Image (cartoon, grey):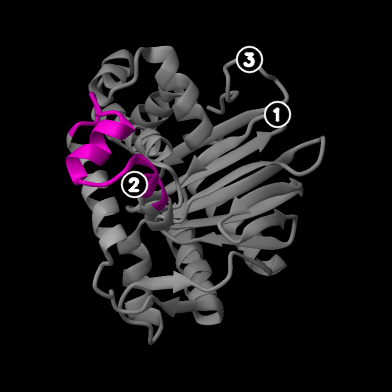
């Protein structure tokens, strides 16, 4: 069942779900007008196709305008935000394949090896955009054969046309090492994080030097990165059946409304709707249109 992003806007709706017959894939189908996504990143990939309107996607290199007939491709851990590019907003279908799913298709269907990445954030490709929507239709109809087949066609086509591999990791600079240590400290103390000054002091640097190093390494300041990490942790708890209020407390949000606000601005649906959809999907097998 589709839900309004804030629970009460009839002109906006969204469904964020999983189809059990295609492991490693999340799906989002939505129409947004006033909703905006705050800066965040994903553990896996994003493959999106706008059906109507325009979505402005703010990437590290600048803003791209996703229109009907384009395909947006975002690699793991690339920070981005999004909002409507026209007053009437946008409607779209998005696939969130895991890194493992993409890597498996790359090994089977391409010569790409190593960590796979897409070289462009947006391309004009109307036929592939239609196929992305077709994956959603097949999953909603409970057609596992079609959903899995079309997904693999989409991913293999995009990898052959736009895929590459990331270079081997180079030794970390002093700034990158500091940023990584700060990231680990924030993960370990997610529920009760230190202040920026305290964290900088613990790492033997200054607050501004830590800010610069962290933003360079992860594309976001530490507080924004921590919010993203908290939402990721909350998603795992919700998927395991934890009540939203308990999940909020466990990951360090002050209360459930605090979780609701940030979760919706990053995931696209409220945590309650996210959890209900997961429960419904696995109870019914995922078929049926919202």
Residue beneath disc 2: 210
Label 2, residues with CA under 10 Å away: few <14, some 14-19, many ≥20: many
Circle 1 or circle 3, nearest the eye: 1
Residue 30 in the image: state x and y as whole percent: 62, 37
Q: What SS does tag 2 mark?
A: helix
Relative side of 279 to 1, left or right: left
Instruction: Using the rendered image of the protein, determine whether residue 53 is visible from the camera's viewpoint.
Output: yes
Residue beneath disc 3: 8
Q: In this view, does 260 lie above or below 268?
A: above
| Image mark for residue 279 | none
Please tell me which of labels 2 and 1 falls first in the chain: 1
In the image, 178 versus 61, the foreground residue is 178
Measuring 44% from the left and 48% from the top, which residue is drawn there? 41
Report which quarter residue 241 is drawn in: top left
Residue 194 in the image: state x and y as whole percent: 25, 29
Q: List the single residue furthest toward the right.
A: 87
Label 3, residues with CA under 10 Å away: few <14, some 14-19, many ≥20: few
Disc 1 to disc 3, C-alpha distance: 12 Å
Q: What SS does tag 1 mark?
A: loop
The stretch in magenta equals 189-212
Please tell me which of labels 1 and 3 falls first in the chain: 3
Disc 2 to disc 3, C-alpha distance: 41 Å
Residue beneath disc 1: 34
């Amino acid at each position: 069942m589709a839900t309004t992003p804030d629970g009460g806007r009839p002109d906006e709706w969204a469904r964020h779900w999983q189809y059990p017959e295609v492991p490693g894939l999340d799906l989002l189908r939505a129409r947004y007008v006033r909703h905006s996504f705050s800066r965040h990143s994903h553990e896996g990939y994003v493959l999106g196709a706008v059906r109507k309107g325009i979505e402005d996607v703010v990437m590290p290199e600048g803003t791209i305008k996703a229109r009907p007939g384009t395909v947006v491709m975002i690699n793991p851990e690339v920070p981005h935000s999004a909002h409507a590019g026209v007053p009437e907003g946008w409607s779209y279908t998005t696939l969130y394949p895991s890194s493992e799913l993409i890597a498996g298709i790359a090994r089977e269907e391409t010569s790409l090896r190593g960590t796979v990445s897409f070289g462009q954030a947006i391309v004009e490709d109307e036929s592939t955009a239609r196929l992305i929507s077709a994956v959603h239709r097949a999953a909603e109809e409970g057609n596992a054969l079609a959903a899995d087949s079309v997904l693999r066609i989409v991913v293999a086509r995009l990898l052959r046309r736009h895929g590459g591999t990331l270079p081997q990791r180079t030794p970390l600079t002093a700034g990158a090492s500091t940023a990584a240590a700060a990231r680990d400290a924030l993960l370990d103390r997610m529920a009760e994080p230190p202040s920026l000054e305290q964290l900088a002091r613990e790492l033997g640097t200054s607050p501004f030097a830590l800010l610069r190093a962290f933003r360079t390494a992860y594309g976001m300041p530490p507080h924004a990165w921590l919010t993203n990490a908290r939402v990721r942790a909350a998603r795992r708890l919700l998927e395991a059946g934890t009540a939203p209020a308990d999940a909020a407390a466990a990951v360090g949000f002050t209360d459930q409304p605090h979780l609701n606000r940030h979760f919706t601005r990053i995931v696209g649906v409220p945590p309650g709707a996210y959890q209900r959809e997961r429960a419904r999907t696995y109870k019914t097998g995922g078929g049926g249109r919202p």
